[in-house]
Image (cartoon, rainbow, N blue to C red):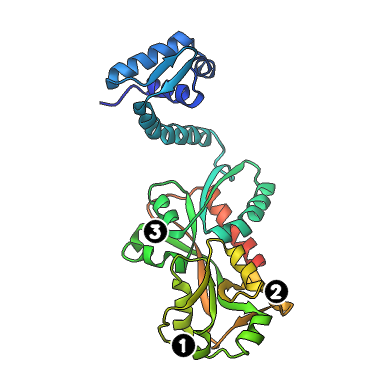
Amino acid sequence: MLPDMNRLKVFYYVYALQSFNLAAKRLHITPSGVSQHIQKLEYEIKTSLFTRLHKKIVPTMAADQLFTTVQPFIEELKLQMENISKPMDKPYGLLRIGAPIEFGKEYLPKICSAFREKYDEVKFNIKLGEADQLLDMLDTNKFDFVLIDYFSAKDQFLGKPQLYTVDSVAEETLILACSRGYYEEKMKKDISFENLVKMDFITDEHEPVILKYWFWHYFKKSVPDLNIVMAIENHQAVLSSIRLGMGLAITVNHFIQEDVENNNIIPVFPGKQKLINKISFVWLQKKHQTITEKVFQTFFKQQIEKMIT
């Protein structure tokens, strides 16, 4: 049997505000009315939810558990009630987006800001993370859609492509790069397989999967254990390490374009067929897309094309 929804609503505000009086003001009822709702809910679930200490209340473990369940439901309900009352012919409301860390930091603030100049009733809730984390959250409806790069998500897509709709957004070139000084002094401008595997490498991966795939793409050879001189979970730090001459690292063309043009960073291309990574919008196949999602995705594609080409 489901608990009374009014009591759950009162509980939500008492817990969130940590006060019976503040909850009463928010709900436009008396403090005694709030207290009665909580008492009835406690009786209904047969456990205490709050300990009263003078003028303070302390949530019990049961209250913590209940709030974890109730909070997303109440907040999603509030959001949908707001959205239902809005016009359906233009973008509005909240967009929940997941994106790769570096790609998201670099481009989402600019594009979201430009989008709000046209549609100021749209708000954003953005989470940056690894592909497996973002897809797990998408599976549980924490996002409207996510931006995923193919290499990071490759394993997650295997076996369950029927769950997702995938819409390609942009392509970027994955590049092995180093400083001009490292290229000339340490590598001696030799980009053969035999010489490259002896060099120093920097990575932002737990395991250098993309780095090893780069070698397979160009040489069709598996690489031995590479000399990883720095593993750091931040791509800007990787770029700084490249510029400082620490070694070679995988990056993407649009992050180092200016450095390459100024001859400060040297991209390594052992063959003509460049290694391409696809960035795509991904959403649950069963999900009906709103006008806000569709318009934003179209706008995003137009903007990102200008930025990375």
Q: Label 2 to label 1, Cα distance in Å?
A: 26 Å
Could you tell me the amino acid type at mark 1?
A: Phe
User: 143 or 191: which is nearer to us?
Assistant: 191
Q: Disc 1 on helix, strand or loop?
A: helix
Q: In the image, 43: left or right of 129?
A: left
Could you tell me the amino acid type at mark 3?
A: Tyr
User: 106 or 300: which is nearer to us?
Assistant: 106
Q: Disc 2 on helix, strand or loop?
A: helix
User: 259 or 230: which is nearer to us?
Assistant: 230
Using the rendered image of the protein, determine whether residue 259 is visible from the camera's viewpoint.
Answer: yes
The structure residue drawn at horizontal position 67% and vertical position 50%, both measured from the top left corner, is: 113
101 shown above or below 68: below
Q: Position of residue 17 (x, y in %)?
A: 51, 24
Q: Tag 3: Cα neighbours inside 10 Å, few (<14), some, or many (≥20)?
A: some
Q: Position of residue 121 (x, y in %)?
A: 62, 41
Query: Which residue is disc 2 drawn over?
Result: 259
Q: Label 3 to label 2, Cα distance in Å?
A: 37 Å
The structure residue drawn at horizontal position 39% and vertical position 31%, both measured from the top left corner, is: 70
204 shown above or below 276: above
Query: Which residue is disc 3 drawn over?
Result: 164
Using the rendered image of the protein, determine whether residue 299 is visible from the camera's viewpoint.
Answer: no
Camera-near label (3 vs 1) is 1
Q: Which mark is residue 303?
A: none
The structure residue drawn at horizontal position 69% and vertical position 48%, both measured from the top left corner, is: 117
Camera-near label (3 vs 2) is 2
Q: Indicate which disc, 2 or 1, sits on the residue closer to the N terminus.
A: 1
The structure residue drawn at horizontal position 57% and vertical position 44%, both measured from the top left corner, is: 89
Looking at the rendered image, the quarter that the N terminus falls into is: top left
Q: Tag 1: Cα neighbours inside 10 Å, few (<14), some, or many (≥20)?
A: some
Query: Which residue is disc 1 drawn over?
Result: 219
Could you tell me the amino acid type at mark 2?
A: Asp
Q: Tag 2: Cα neighbours inside 10 Å, few (<14), some, or many (≥20)?
A: some
